[in-house]
Image (cartoon, grey):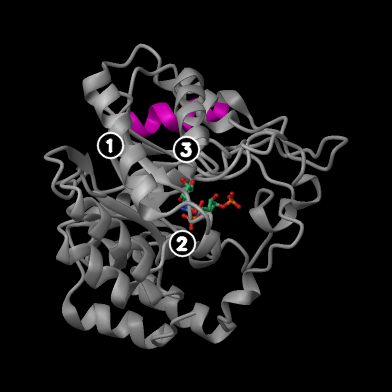
């Protein structure tokens, strides 16, 4: 495993983060049309991550571990991923791992059970800590913008949580470069702590992050937590070739890997490139991201121990500048 200091925090973290949006699930659908979380397998994946040297885990208060768009209004499983992660980490030395979680999405039916308001933040962090079984969260992320709460309120409420010892640092996810800059400006104006990281999508088929966002984060010495590094499995070849175990495509009702606009020809070229380097497609897609800079931290999702083990192999792949250029030529510089 490779490690880097996370932005300006001084915390040493693994270059790969384990994500918990989707957790390993059973192979049979229940009455609700869901593939329920396989808690034992989920715990095995988290424990295996620790064995492999991953010391950074990402979750969110809204994560259910499974997803079903038809049941989007069903809030009964909200917080499931935090609970499973907390159980799996129980007994581990608190100093030995780093946890990020997020808030903003709807977690209950009440008018204040969502958003970035100070009122919601206060209860959101308390509930997350309880589900995780932790005294503090290392990195707390605004899961997006609620279009009502201003950057001054967010900066102040995050600083309050730091003072209370609930969180060590905070960051922003799904923000535009302008919205991110507004957070930095608000912090600077009041001489308060600023965001230390962003969490955004970035992969070989979606490179919009490489523009203003990357420049803004870098200018402030921040870290970049990268989600969907495999384009939700597309870049691992999850939706091409012979049918394997049930994939996200089957349980996400509206999930369409084709929306990435990737052709069979591109996938074949990518697969050939990976084979020539004695790597899998998943490893190649992750190695490309890791080579983009030491402050790029891909968050990997894995529905089995085998997938996780394979993905960690990306850390030993070294790509030359011409390899990077060749990979980028295969998919073009699409800014989707
Ligand atoms: N901030 C945000 O708004 C946001 C949004 C999305 C995600 N995230 C975070 O980012 C994490 C990762 O996102 P993601 O799950 O979309 O990441 P991803 O790595 O792009 O996709 C993970 C999926 O790819 C497939 N996969 C992984 N390794 C594989 C391998 N070696 N071989 C074949 N298939 C493989 C699995 O699909 P199957 O399940 O079908 O096997 C796995 O569930 C999340 O868990 C979450 O923590 C944050």
Q: Residues within 10 Å of mark 3 (few under 14, many from 20)?
A: some
Tell me the element at label 1: helix
Q: In the image, is 333 to the left or to the right of 318? A: right
Question: In terms of sequence position, does the residue under pointer 1 or pointer 3 come before the other?
Answer: 1
Contact? badges 2 and 1 (CB < 8 Å): no
Which segment did they paint magenta?
Answer: 41-55
Q: Is residue 177 magenta?
A: no
Quarter of the image for residue 219 reads: bottom left
- The residue lying at 22 percent from left, 66 percent from top is 291
Residue furthest right in the image: 31
Of the numbered discs in the image, which one, if any, rests on residue 305? 3
- The residue lying at 19 percent from left, 46 percent from top is 6
- Dominant secondary structure of the residues highlighted in magenta in the image: helix
Q: For the residues marked 3 and 2, what is the alpha-carbon distance in whole angstroms?
A: 17 Å
- Dot 1 corresponds to which residue? 159
Up the image or down, 194 lies above or below 127; here it is below
Q: For the residues marked 1 and 3, what is the alpha-carbon distance in whole angstroms?
A: 37 Å
Rendered-image quadrant of the N terminus = top left
Q: For the residues marked 2 and 1, what is the alpha-carbon distance in whole angstroms?
A: 34 Å
* Residue 57: percent from left, percent from top: 37, 37
Q: Is residue 47 magenta?
A: yes
Quarter of the image for residue 111 reads: top right
Question: In terms of sequence position, does the residue under pointer 2 or pointer 1 come before the other?
Answer: 1
């Amino acid at each position: 495993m490779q490690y880097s200091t996370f932005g300006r925090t001084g915390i040493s973290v693994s270059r790969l983060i384990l994500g918990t949006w989707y957790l390993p699930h059973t192979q049979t659908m229940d009455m609700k049309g869901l593939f329920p979380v396989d808690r034992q397998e989920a715990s095995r994946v988290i424990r295996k991550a620790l064995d492999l040297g991953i010391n950074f885990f990402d979750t969110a208060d809204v994560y259910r571990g499974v997803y079903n768009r038809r049941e989007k209004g069903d809030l009964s499983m909200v917080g499931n991923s935090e609970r499973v992660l907390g159980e799996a980490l129980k007994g581990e030395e608190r100093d030995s791992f780093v946890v990020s979680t997020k808030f903003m999405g709807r977690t209950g039916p009440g008018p204040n059970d969502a958003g970035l308001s100070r009122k919601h933040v206060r209860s959101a962090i308390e509930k997350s800590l309880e589900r995780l079984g932790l005294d503090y969260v290392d990195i707390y992320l605004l899961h997006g913008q609620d279009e009502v709460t201003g950057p001054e309120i967010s900066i102040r409420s995050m600083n309050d949580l730091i003072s209370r010892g609930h969180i060590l640092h905070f960051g922003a996810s799904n923000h535009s470069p302008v919205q991110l800059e507004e957070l930095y400006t608000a912090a600077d104006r009041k001489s308060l702590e600023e965001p230390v990281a962003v969490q955004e999508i970035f992969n070989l088929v979606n490179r919009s992050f490489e523009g203003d966002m990357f420049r803004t984060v870098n200018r402030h010495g921040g870290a970049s937590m990268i989600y969907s590094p495999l384009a939700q499995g597309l870049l691992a070849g999850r939706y091409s070739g012979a049918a394997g175990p049930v994939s996200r495509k089957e349980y996400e009702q509206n999930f369409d890997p084709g929306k990435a606009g990737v052709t069979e020809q591109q996938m074949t070229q990518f697969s050939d490139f990976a084979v020539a380097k004695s790597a899998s497609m998943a490893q190649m897609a992750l190695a490309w991201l890791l080579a983009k800079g030491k402050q790029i931290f891909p968050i990997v999702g894995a529905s089995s121990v085998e997938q996780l083990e394979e993905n960690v192999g990306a850390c030993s792949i070294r790509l030359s500048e011409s390899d990077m250029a060749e990979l980028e030529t295969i998919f073009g510089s699409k800014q989707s």
